[in-house]
Amino acid sequence: MRPKLSKVPFILLAITVLLTFVFPSVPGGATPAGLSPADTAWMLTATALVLIMTPGLAFFYGGMVNRRNVISTMLQSFICMAMISVIWVVFGFSLAFGESMGGFVGNPTTFFMMRNVLDGAPWELAPTIPLALFAMFQLKFAIITPALITGAFAERIRFTSYTVFVLLFFVFIYAPLAHATWHPQGLLFQMGVLDFAGGTVVHMSAGWAALASAICLKRRHEVSHSPAYITFVLLGTGLLWFGWFGFNAGSAMGANPLAATALATTMTASAAAALAWIFFDGVKGRKPSALGTCIGAVVGLVAITPGAGFVTLPHSIAIGVISAVVSNLLVDLRSRTNVDDTLDVFPCHGVGGMVGMLLTGVFASKGVNPAIADQGLIFGETRLFLVQLTALIGVSIFAFGGSWVLLKLTNLITPLRVSVEEEQLGLDLSQHDEKM
């Protein structure tokens, strides 16, 4: 970080501490009525499950990079747990779920410093759990989204520049998308867009930001290498798969049949995608690999996320297979371009999220979730599919264009890329003075 900016992060943290004295947000009301112990217990569990996904992602990405960059890649995921958690308390939750400002973003003062959260009435879409629990559950989604982007610019971004970009991405990309999609007065919510657990908010936003990052930061000087630790990738996949049950089933906001449906569709879509990836590799003459199995499983998890609580179990298998084949083809296509998306975040997370969004518009069923207004194409209705397609186009433009601008702004504040010498030395040593 430039000398003039080196003290800024600590100053901002010190200001946050001072704010805790001015805005202690002490609860003063009685416990709201209508809370469900069972729903609360399940959502506490789901919140913990979603949190473990970020360390899982750290292992997943860390195992794929060069051995000189394992620590730096993993730390980029872990630092999101620290940064976004503090931002969320100060104003982040309010930006995402505060009083709607035109359907685009929440009022930053609604829940500033978690005002009215500890004693506030439950969120209207989660009426049986405490508002504080809903806030902490949603925090875990906000944490993993910028962490997903890190695979695109791994091995060449300066750590301090990355932290600046994370802050900007959360404020200007993630929070508006979360509000527009999940707030009852949000623009996409009002359109009727279905995104059960984050296909638009999490995976599409991260995927398009990843593509913008790969283009802006240009190619690494050493592109080809063997993954450092395939065992890390296997461990990370297991943690992601495990935590994803909280991600999707938790989005039912209670211990109910819908949560069971989302859990089941999550399992089957991921399993089908893992098989589809290695079987499709076999069609192309490749051997079945641990890396391919893991990537396929994660693509299936990504693709089922928007429709987990809207589609049947058989259709979840179709979603898994289709998404794996499409992403597999896109990975091959990307490798023949000059775009250095280090760990193929866009073909897997971005495209996987888009395929899932569109297939939700194909397979969504009122029999699974009576709350939806329209069913998918397969049931003879077209409106939902067109709504999903419109949202996909709009969010893609917003996430890619916005991320591009934020990357350029970050580079003006502090250079994005490490020097050639630092890249060759490895980011573990050059950025953190640590090594495996």
Image (tube, rainbow, N blue to C red):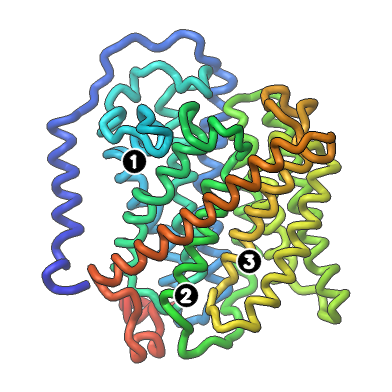
Relative to 123, residue 303 above or below: below
- Three-letter residue code for mark 3: Pro
- Residue at image point 41% right, 61% down: 403
Query: From the viewer's perspective, is the residue at label 3 or at label 1 nearer?
Result: 3
Which of pointers 2 and 3 lies earlier in the amino acid sequence?
2
- SS for tag 2? helix
Measured from the top left, where is residue 39 in percent x and y?
Answer: 57, 22
Q: Which residue is mark 2?
A: 215
- Residue at image point 65% right, 83% down: 336
- Three-letter residue code for mark 1: Gly
- Three-letter residue code for mark 2: Ile
Q: Which mark is residue 384?
A: none
| Along the viewing direction, whichever of 387 and 62 lies nearer the viewer | 387
Q: Is residue 250 visible?
A: no
Query: From the viewer's perspective, is the residue at label 2 or at label 3 nearer?
Result: 2
Q: Are marks 1 and 2 in contact (CB under 8 Å)?
A: no
Horizontal relation, residue 434 to residue 318: left or right: left
Q: Which residue is mark 1?
A: 92
Measured from the top left, where is residue 232 in percent x and y?
Answer: 59, 68
Which of the 4 image quarters holds residue 231? Answer: bottom right
| Quadrant placement of the C terminus | bottom left
Which of the 4 image quarters holds residue 95? Answer: top left
Quote the CA–CA distance across marks 1 and 2: 28 Å
| Along the viewing direction, whichever of 310 and 251 lies nearer the viewer | 310
Measured from the top left, where is residue 192 in percent x and y?
Answer: 60, 32
Quote the CA–CA distance across marks 3 and 1: 29 Å
Relative to 312, residue 288 above or below: below
| Quadrant placement of the N terminus | bottom left
